[in-house]
Amino acid sequence: MSKYVIYINLPKYLSEWLVFRLGDPVVFPASSPQNAVIRTFLNKPPKGYIPETGGKHMTAVAIPDSASKPAETYFYMTQRGKEAVAEACKDLFLRSLWADMTPLADAPVGLNKLIAAWCESNGIGLDRVETVRQCYYRIRKDYAKQGVNLRNSSRKK
């Protein structure tokens, strides 16, 4: 990992989850798709560019080491590039949420409590549980619209 970072504006729940799971600054595994997105959109800074110092609602993401784009030279990213990184982060979050919650769908515990416990164990503030619950329900709803039932339709006796 280089000592250089980019700052991404992320929803609070997503920022908390990333920092809890991958550190501050967020460091993705070397061969991750997220690092591939970061490397793709890194550029040399324009003349007169003043490096960002972060902010209240910004998440620091480490620029990966790269022989073709050394971080000392390539540390600038456009707003659309940052949006692509944010989308890759959200996709990672949703896959993790789905993978962790789906096996628990048949548990005798209410889904709201399961999601609250998941948030707590993944560094997400309990005031953001409703947002995470909506993410989970949206996945199920979107597939249901296409005729794909992701819910277990039978009860264990």
Image (cartoon, grey):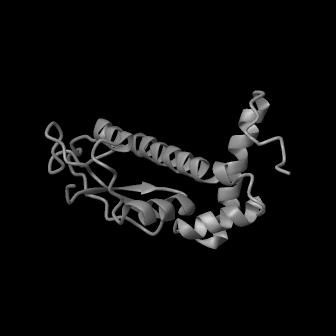
Judge left or right: residue 146 versus residue 47: right
Q: Is residue 151 above or below residue 125?
A: above
Judge left or right: residue 95 versus residue 28: right
Examine the image and state in which quarter residue 22 appears.
bottom left
> At 82% across and 49% down in the image, what residue appears?
156
Look at the image and tell me whether residue 69 can be seen.
yes
How many marks on residues? Answer: 0
> At 55% across and 68% down in the image, what residue appears?
121
> At 23% across and 44% down in the image, what residue appears?
46
Locate residue 127, reporting x and y percent: 66, 71
Look at the image and tell me whether residue 124 can be seen.
no
Depth check, front residue: 106 or 65? 106
Depth check, front residue: 143 or 54? 143
Judge left or right: residue 94 versus residue 70: right
Judge left or right: residue 145 versus residue 24: right
Locate residue 152, reporting x and y percent: 77, 42
In the picture, the quarter occupied by the N terminus is bottom left
Q: Residue furthest top?
A: 146
Locate residue 3, reporting x and y percent: 20, 60
Examine the image and state in which quarter residue 117 appears.
bottom right
Q: Is residue 101 above or below residue 79?
A: below
Q: Residue furthest front?
A: 157
